[in-house]
């Protein structure tokens, strides 16, 4: 990364099972409180179902199940992050949303040595914020690129 | 100057102008003297030229410019409209369409060569004949000082030689040789003529035949068809130099350019014109009533172009407004707010109107589909040498654009079938005691909440016997089964996959993928198709389509806490079935419904509903059609019938069997719509 020009990007931090994650804010359309999703029979387990967002029916993905992380029940703080990718609008269910941060691209370490339960191809890297906060930066396009 | 922002406007407008030109040319073909139409065509071509030149699309501009030259001459009565010219103009339109496609695909680059067409147009503008492949079966009447007419029939091989010759730029002559009346050695003279001619070219055909000529079985004149690169003078010289030859009349045959005999050419053009007029009077006998309609100016409607996505989102927003309004009304009731309730009744009316308008905006006249058929029928009937009149009725009938987008292909297929298999050749029709010109009727009309599209031809009809035999041949049915079927039932067999009754595979239709594809497509649109046919008098195909695909009638059912919508079109009936009436046959649950064995499925179990109910003492069963079969779905509760707005589930869910989409219920929740055909 050192050879590349340093840029400032905005990321949205959220948590899954007490771990902190982040994704680039460009894809985020909005954040909503969980609403009752309609289960879609015969679909993958990590698809919680579909919801109605102002007349548009869109699927909700449970990232914990997607990444095979053990699920903790944090219903009161749970949020759905609505993402707009290319031509699909999709929601991801997270345990809580923390904040929007600005980080320099030089703070992203693309080849993390830390152990992760998540498949490496879903990750863009790990970013360090301050002294002790580490965010796993998701490659959200890759994460949601899936077949039923 | 950046042109890209004008690109979409250019493309839309050019398409509009090309369609206008196409329609206008068709009208012109029916009435070549219609000056108003010529003006119309000229204006459209002119606009197109201006637009494309501004955008820097030189080929489009050049081609339209050359077209304009021709049109200008027609307008000023310098040249007359004939069918070759119309063919060429139609060809130009096709090329222009192609160029515009390329402009879209290649970001402004035109690929197709237009030079050849431009050449042809230039020749035409200079007053020359169009250079075209000569597939005229008969030579045109001889001209000059001799009024005697002659006909020579060519076989396929001879025609091919003539065509090749024309393509190579070799001239075809028809020669009338007149020997002196008291010529003694006619056979010898003929031999010498042949010998001289063979030195400079090739004799293709004689009338009478060569054998007859050798046996002197002719009076004093005979005819020759001769190809050579020499001029008519040189040909004439080669013949008249022989003694006892009184004269030789050398005429350039039709379809050959660079003739040195302008007078002959003109007469030929007249002859073609006459032939067409004759053809027209025959064709117009039946269609006199439509003529008035055809000659009328193509109607221009002023429109605003809206991206269809915007219409969809508008529809969504209106639906959302309706749902939120319902919520507000509930709050008004809960807290007993009379003022809020009063205001909401106003809002209610406004949203109802709004919804009606938005639904209407999505409706498109079926004209946008029908408009391509006159041209298609014209081209195909020329290709197959059939005389066919297309009568279009009810093109203003409106349908949802989602239906419009899908209905084109099935209709093309059906009309092609009518042209290829339905309408007979002109000779065949005369033999059958019909008028030479066949008629295809294409009609659309509203019928309740549906649109009925009828395609009727007065052709030879479909023979149920042939269909039956074919079905036996293909092993679809046994002889006994066919014998037991009614004619109508046998006709339905043509919707079976892999069924094609065309005797020979032609370019038009009959490749074995036929009516079954049409049927599948229509059914996918929640429509129905039926066919009626009488041998000798024609075939009628009726297609029934829902007005819109966006809103359907559905039955809402409850399975535990989940709500599903089953399209009403798939439902036969709902019944109550006692547990004791459900039997197990080969591991499957069935019940007997009025003597018919119907499989029963626990719907909740099938859809993996959490904690689904087992079969109760008394069960509510929805009987649905699945193809030809009936299946009973056990549900917990029937909520009721209602109109639902279909929404796509999106890419993530494509391929999920049994679910076709979703709809938003009054409480804002999503209910899934069942796709009965893929459920099991």
Image (cartoon, rainbow, N blue to C red):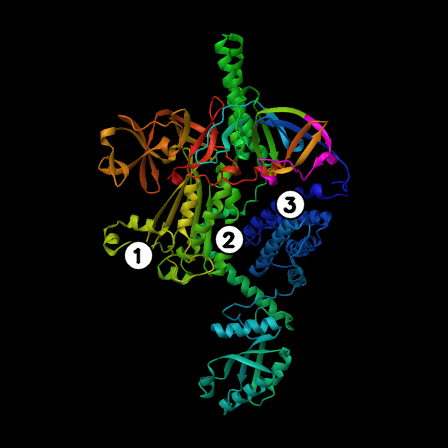
Between the residue at mark 1 and the residue at mark 3, the CA separation in whole angstroms equals 51 Å
Residue at the spot 35% in from the left edge and 40% down from the top edge: B626
> Callout 1: few (<14), some (14-19), or many (20+) C-alpha neighbours within 10 Å?
few
The answer as to whether the residues below labels 1 and 3 share one chain is yes
Image-quadrant location for residue A42 = top left
Q: Chain of mark 1?
A: B
Q: Is residue B345 left or right of residue B108?
A: left
Counting from the top left corner in percent of width and height, residue B266 is at 60, 67
Q: Which mark is residue B475?
A: 1
Magenta residues, as a range? A100-121
Same-chain status of marks 2 and 3? yes
Q: Which mark is residue B621?
A: none
On screen, residue B423 versus residue A74, left or right, reads: left
Tell me the element at label 3.
helix
Give the percent coordinates (x, y) of residue B419.
Answer: 44, 55
Circle 3 chain: B
Callout 2 environment at 10 Å: few (<14), some (14 to 19), or many (20+)?
some
Give the answer, above or below, for where B522 lies relative to B199.
above
Residue B420 x/y as whole percent = 43, 57
Q: Quadrant of the C terminus of chain B?
A: top left
Residue A116 falls within the magenta-colored stretch: yes
Image mark for residue B376: 2
Q: Is residue B294 left or right of residue A83?
A: left
In the image, B12 versus B34, the foreground residue is: B12
On the image, numbered disc 3 is attached to which residue?
B11
The mark closer to the camera, 2 or 1, is: 1
Asked whether residue B61 appears in the rendered view, the answer is yes
Secondary structure at numbered mark 2: helix
User: In percent of the image, x 64 and y 44: which residue is there?
Assistant: B13
């Amino acid at each position: 990364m050192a050879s590349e020009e340093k840029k400032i990007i905005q990321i949205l931090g959220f948590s899954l099972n007490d771990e902190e994650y982040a994704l680039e804010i460009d894809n985020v359309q909005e954040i909503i409180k969980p609403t009752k999703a309609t289960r879609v029979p015969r679909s993958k387990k990590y698809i919680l179902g579909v919801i109605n967002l102002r007349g548009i029916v869109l699927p909700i993905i449970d990232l914990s199940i997607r990444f095979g992380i053990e699920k903790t029940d944090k219903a009161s703080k749970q949020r759905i992050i609505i993402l707009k990718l290319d031509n699909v609008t999709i929601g991801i269910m997270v345990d809580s949303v923390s904040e929007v941060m600005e980080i320099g691209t030089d703070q992203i370490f693309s080849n993390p040595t830390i152990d992760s339960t998540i498949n490496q191809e879903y990750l863009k890297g790990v970013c360090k914020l301050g002294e002790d906060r580490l965010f796993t930066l998701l490659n959200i396009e890759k994460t949601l690129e899936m077949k039923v | 100057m950046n042109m890209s922002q004008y690109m979409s406007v250019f493309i839309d407008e050019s398409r509009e102008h090309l369609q206008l030109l196409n329609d206008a040319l068709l009208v012109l073909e029916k009435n070549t003297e219609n000056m108003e139409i010529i003006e119309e065509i000229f204006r459209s071509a002119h606009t197109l030229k201006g637009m494309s030149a501004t955008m820097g699309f030189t080929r489009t501009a050049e081609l339209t410019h050359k077209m304009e030259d021709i049109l200008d001459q027609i307008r000023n009565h310098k040249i007359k409209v004939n069918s070759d010219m119309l063919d060429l103009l139609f060809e130009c339109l096709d090329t222009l369409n192609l160029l515009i496609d390329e402009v879209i695909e290649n970001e402004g680059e035109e690929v197709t060569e237009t030079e050849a067409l431009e050449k042809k147009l230039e020749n035409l503008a200079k007053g020359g004949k169009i250079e075209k492949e000569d597939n005229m079966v008969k030579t045109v009447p001889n001209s000059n000082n001799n009024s005697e007419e002659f006909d020579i029939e060519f076989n396929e091989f001879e025609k091919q030689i003539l065509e090749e010759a024309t393509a190579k730029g070799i001239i075809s002559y028809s020669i009338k040789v007149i020997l002196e009346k008291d010529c003694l050695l006619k056979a010898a003279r003929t031999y010498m003529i042949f010998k001289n001619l063979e030195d400079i070219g090739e004799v293709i055909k004689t009338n009478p035949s060569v054998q007859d000529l050798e046996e002197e079985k002719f009076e004093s004149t005979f005819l020759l068809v001769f190809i050579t690169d020499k001029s008519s003078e040189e040909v004439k010289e080669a013949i008249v130099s022989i003694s006892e030859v009184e004269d030789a009349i050398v005429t350039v045959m039709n379809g050959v350019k660079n003739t040195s005999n302008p007078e002959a050419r003109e007469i030929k053009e007249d002859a073609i014109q006459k032939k067409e007029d004759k053809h027209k009077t025959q064709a117009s006998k039946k269609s006199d009533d439509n003529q008035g309609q055809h000659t009328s100016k193509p109607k221009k409607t002023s429109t605003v172009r809206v991206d269809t996505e915007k219409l969809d989102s508008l529809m969504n927003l209106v639906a959302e407004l309706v749902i939120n309004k319902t919520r507000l009304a509930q709050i008004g009731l809960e807290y007993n707010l009379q003022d809020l309730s009063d205001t909401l009744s106003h809002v209610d009316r406004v949203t109802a109107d709004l919804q009606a308008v938005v639904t209407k905006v999505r409706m498109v006249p079926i004209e946008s589909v029908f408009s391509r058929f006159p041209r298609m029928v014209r081209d195909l009937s020329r290709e197959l040498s059939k005389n066919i009149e297309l009568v279009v009725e009810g093109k203003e009938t409106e349908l949802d654009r989602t239906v419009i987008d899908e209905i084109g292909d099935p209709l093309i297929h059906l009309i092609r079938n009518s042209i290829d298999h339905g309408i007979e050749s002109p000779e065949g029709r005369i033999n059958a005691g019909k008028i030479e010109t066949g008629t295809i009727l294409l009609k659309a009309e509203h019928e309740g909440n549906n649109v009925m599209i009828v395609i009727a031809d007065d052709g030879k009809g479909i023979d149920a016997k042939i269909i039956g035999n074919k079905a036996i041949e293909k092993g679809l049915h046994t002889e006994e089964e066919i014998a037991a079927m009614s004619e109508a039932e046998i006709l339905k067999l043509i919707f079976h996959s892999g069924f094609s009754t065309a005797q020979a595979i032609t370019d038009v239709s009959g490749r074995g993928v036929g009516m079954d594809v049409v049927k599948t497509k229509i059914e996918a649109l929640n429509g129905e198709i039926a066919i009626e046919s009488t041998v000798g008098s024609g075939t009628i195909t009726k297609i029934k389509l829902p007005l819109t695909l966006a809103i359907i009638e559905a039955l809402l059912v409850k399975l535990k806490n989940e709500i599903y919508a089953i399209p009403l079109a798939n439902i036969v009936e709902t019944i109550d079935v006692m547990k004791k009436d459900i039997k197990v046959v080969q591991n499957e649950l069935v019940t007997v419904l009025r003597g018919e064995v119907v499989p029963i499925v626990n719907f909740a179990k099938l859809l993996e509903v959490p904690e689904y109910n087992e079969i109760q003492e008394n069960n509510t069963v929805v009987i649905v059609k699945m193809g030809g079969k009936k299946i009973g779905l056990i549900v917990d509760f029937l909520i009721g019938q209602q109109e639902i707005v279909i929404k796509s589930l999106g890419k993530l869910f494509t391929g999920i069997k049994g679910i076709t989409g979703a709809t938003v219920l009054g409480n804002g929740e999503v209910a899934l719509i069942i796709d009965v055909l893929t459920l099991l």
